[in-house]
Amino acid sequence: MEPRGIKLVSRYKSYYGIPTDVEISEEMVLHHWALEKKLTKELLDSTPESRWEVFEQAYTLLYSELEWLNKIPGDTRSASEKYQTWVTTIGDKPKKIYEVGSGKGEMISYLAQCGFECKGTEITKERGSKHVNESLPNLVWASSDGINLVQFEPMDYYDLVVSNQVIEHFHPDDLQTHFQNAFSILNKNGRYIFSTPHCHTGPQDVSFVFDYDDSKGMHLKEYTYSQLIEPLTLAGFKNISCTIPFGINKFLQKSGIKDQDRLTKVGALYFNFMLLVEKMLFLIPIKKIRRPFAKFLRKIYIFADNIFLVAHK
C-alpha cells in the first residue's frame, strides 16, 4: 500500500532533501505523483518524430507546476566538494566541455569557474541558465533535445561531453542514438563522462517515495553497468572504465599513481569489479532486500550504486 499522510510527506521531504520547516502538503506530493505518472506515459508513448516537442512540453509543465522542485536546496555541500571527482577525472585544462541536461546549471557553472570552456544545455527554459545568477565569459547556453546532438553542434569538436543524472530520463529507444551523437561531436581524443542511477538501488525518482521497487515516474529506465556496455561499444566508444571514487582516488594519488593513463587502467579494473558485484547482487531475487544490501556495499566501496563511467573515443 502506498504511504499517505504524515508518513508520505516525511518520506518526500527526506528523499528530496527538503528542510523540515518548508511547507509541503500531502496534496502537493500527490499532485507531483499524479503529474509524473501522466507525463511518463506521454513520454513513453511519444514517437521519434514528436519526441523533442513532447519532452520539452512535459519538463516545462513539470517544473512550472511543481515550482518547489526548483527551490529544493538538495546537496548542501560546496560545489568543489560535490564535483571534485568530476574535476579530477576531467584532468588538466584547457578543455572544451559540452554538458547534456544541465539542470539548474550548478556543475557546468563550476567547471567554467575552474577555467574550462563550457556549454550548458537544457530541453526546457524552466531549467538551465534561468537558475544561474553569475555570468561567466567561458560559459554559453543553448537548447537541445539531448539526443540528436549533431543537429546542434559541430562534429569532432569537443574534448568532453558530460551528463550528470540525465540518461535515465531519455526514452530507452533513444539511448543508442544519444551515445552515437555524443561520439560524433567529440574530437579524436575525446571522452564521454556520465553518471546515472543504478537500478539495483532504485528507483531513484518519486516512485521511491511511494515505496515502489521499480520506477513509475520520469526515470524512464534505470540501468545496470552491463546494460550500458553494448550501446557504448556500438556507438564506437572504447576503453570504458569507471570513474574512481574520490576516496580511492585520493589514496592512489598519495601512493604516487597520478597520471591519467594509470588512473584509466585502475578505473577499468574497478569497472570489471563492479560488473562482477552487479552479477552477484542479481542472485538476490527480492528488490527490497537487494537494495539495502547494495547500499551497504557502496559504503565500503565494494559497489557503486551511482554508475559513473568514462568512455573514450
Image (cartoon, grey):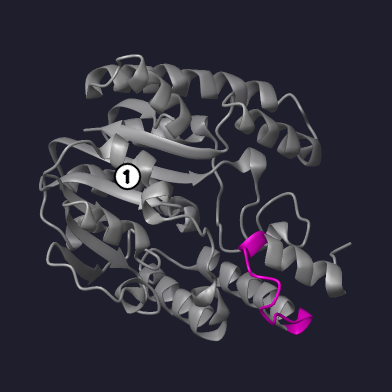
Q: Secondary structure at mark 1?
A: helix
Q: Which residue is mark 1?
A: 179
Up the image or down, 149 lies above or below 251; here it is below
Q: Which residues are magenta?
A: 15-27
What amino acid type should be assigned to the residue bearing mark 1?
Answer: Phe
Q: Position of residue 200 (x, y in %)?
A: 65, 38
Residue 81 part of the magenta-drawn span: no
Q: Is residue 252 left or right of residue 98?
A: right
Q: Is residue 4 visible?
A: no
Q: Position of residue 119 (x, y in %)?
A: 20, 61
Q: Residue at x 24, y 24 (%)?
A: 260
Residue 26 part of the magenta-drawn span: yes
Asked where in the image residue 292 lies, by quadrant, the reply is top right
Q: Residue furthest right?
A: 1
Q: Is residue 69 left or right of residue 56?
A: right
If the image is split into quadrants, where does the C terminus sit?
top left
Pointer 1: residues within 10 angstroms few (<14), some, or many (20+)?
many
Q: Is residue 112 left or right of residue 27?
A: left
Q: Position of residue 41 (x, y in %)?
A: 59, 68
Asked where in the image residue 276 lies, by quadrant, the reply is top right
Q: Residue at x 68, y 26 (%)?
A: 281
Main secondary structure type of the part rendered in magenta: loop
Q: Residue at x 69, y 32 (%)?
A: 296
51, 296: nearer the viewer: 296
